[in-house]
Structures are given as C-alpha cells and as structure tokens.
Image (tube, grey):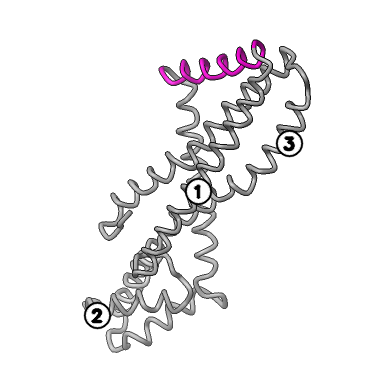
Amino acid sequence: MKKLTAEQIDQLYLFTRQHYVEWYDLQSELVDHLANAIEMQWQENPKLTFDEVLNKEFQKFGVFGFMDVVEEKQKFLNKKYRKLIWKYYTEFFRLPKIILTFISMLLIYKLLILFEEAKDIIFGLIVILSLGFFVRTFYKEKFISDKNKSNRKKWMFEDVSLQNKNNVFIVLPSLLINSFNLFFKELHFTTITAIIFSVSLVLLGLLIYLKIKIIPKKISEELAKTYPEYIS
C-alpha cells in the first residue's frame, strides 16, 4: 500500500495553513485526518496522484473548507476551558482550601464592620491589584507575541485561554465602578451588605486568579504532554 512521505506530510501542513488554519494543534488533527483518508483512497485506486486525492478529500469539507472545523474546535475548547475552571474552582470549597476561603471572607467582613476606613483600603487594594494584573498580562502577552513573530507555533487552546483572560480586563473596570456605586457610597456597612460584599469579593477574586494564573499554566502543561513541539 502507498504511504505518504515526510515531504507530503509537510505539504499537508502547508495546505492547512493556506486554508486559514493557523493553529498547530488543529493543523495536526487535520493533517492526521487527511493523511489517513489519502492512504485509504490509494488502497482503492493507487494510480491517483497525491494532489488529486488531496483535492478530492478537501471537497468533502464543503464550500467553507476548514472553517466549520475551526468553529467546532473553538466551541469544543471553550467548553473544555469552562470545565477546567469549574474543576479547579470547586477545589476552593473542599478541604483544606475551603478553610482559607472561609477565613478570607471572614477577615474582609470583620474589617468592614470594625473599621470605617476599611472600605477605602479594600477598594484601593482592588484597584492596585487590578492594575498590577493588567500590567503583568500586557507584558506577558507582548512577550508571547514577540515569540510568535519568531516563528513560534500558534495553539488554539492557548488562544482560548488568552481570550478568556483578556475578558477579565474588559469586565473588571465596569465591575469596580458598579461595586463602588453599590457598596462604597454608604457611610457604614450593614451586616447584610458586609456579608454579601465579602463573599462576592472572595468568589470573584478566586475566579480571576484561576483565569489569570492557574488555568493558563494547566493548559500549557496539557499541550506540552500532547505535543512534543510545544514551547511555553
């Protein structure tokens, strides 16, 4: 049976790039699919040329080519991303992490109830931390962008993670403003508002921490295990 050569495999990678598939992880899946399909076609008719079989297989993807595959892959990875978030988020509500989670909520609540100026300090810390995360993320993504310009492969799962991370910085400013209007215009926190704010702040902080710090690292580890070519 005719087998694809290494040169023909490289041509398949080039073919996927020419048809707007820029992510190496998805390219690899498509190349594997096309390679198997081409070799099966050769089993039935070995006289067909490589280009003839490739064009025949590509036509099976329809008018939009690989675009439907790209869309489905993005949906799949976004769903996988949400499952990762849920998996590691729920760990904060199991022993031993739940103890630290509860202590954080209690500490913020006590500060708000006992000290009038605590609300201003907490809000200032939120702003400082948000700016710190923004600056850190900006320089990290600039570093990744520079590496991409140096022919570093693109990975769709990384892009999904980056998009979700960037969404934090789109939503965060309005969230801070709304929090200020809702809670900080009051001269004193009541017991109820202090509890709501303390719980909400810790829950939101954990979610942001996961999106910015934990999940990107887990995705990098998964890509490194799956693809030897991956460089974080």
The dominant secondary structure in magenta is helix
Q: Where does residue 34 sit, x and y in percent of width and height?
A: 37, 72
Q: Disc 1 vs disc 3: which is toward the camera?
A: 1
Question: Where's the N terminus, which quadrant?
Answer: bottom left
Vertical arrangement, residue 49 with respect to residue 160, above or below:
below
Question: Where's the C terminus, which quadrant?
Answer: bottom left
Q: Is residue 104 magenta?
A: yes
Q: Is residue 69 magenta?
A: no
Vertical arrangement, residue 150 with respect to residue 222, above or below:
below
> Which residue is denoted by mark 1 in the rendering?
135
Q: Looking at this view, is 86 or 104 the one in front?
A: 104
Residue name at image x 68 percent, y 39 percent: 175
Residue name at image x 43 percent, y 82 percent: 56
Task: State how far apart marks 1 and 2 are (Cα).
Answer: 44 Å
What's the residue type where badge 1 is placed?
Val
Classify mark 1: helix, strand or loop.
helix
Vertical arrangement, residue 218 with respect to residue 226, above or below:
above
What's the residue type where badge 2 is placed?
Glu
Q: Where does residue 203 sit, x and y in percent of width and height?
A: 57, 28
Q: Disc 1 vs disc 2: which is toward the camera?
A: 1
> Which residue is denoted by mark 3 in the rendering?
178
Task: State how far apart marks 1 and 3 are (Cα).
Answer: 22 Å
What's the residue type where badge 3 is placed?
Asn
Residue name at image x 29 percent, y 76 percent: 10
Q: Where does residue 150 sit, x and y in percent of width and height?
A: 34, 69
Vertical arrangement, residue 228 with respect to residue 109, above or below:
below
1 or 2: tag closer to the N-terminus = 2
Residue name at image x 27 percent, y 60 percent: 229
The magenta segment is: 96-114
Task: State how far apart marks 2 and 3 are (Cα).
Answer: 58 Å
Q: Are marks 1 and 2 in contact (CB under 8 Å)?
A: no
> Which residue is denoted by mark 2 in the rendering?
7
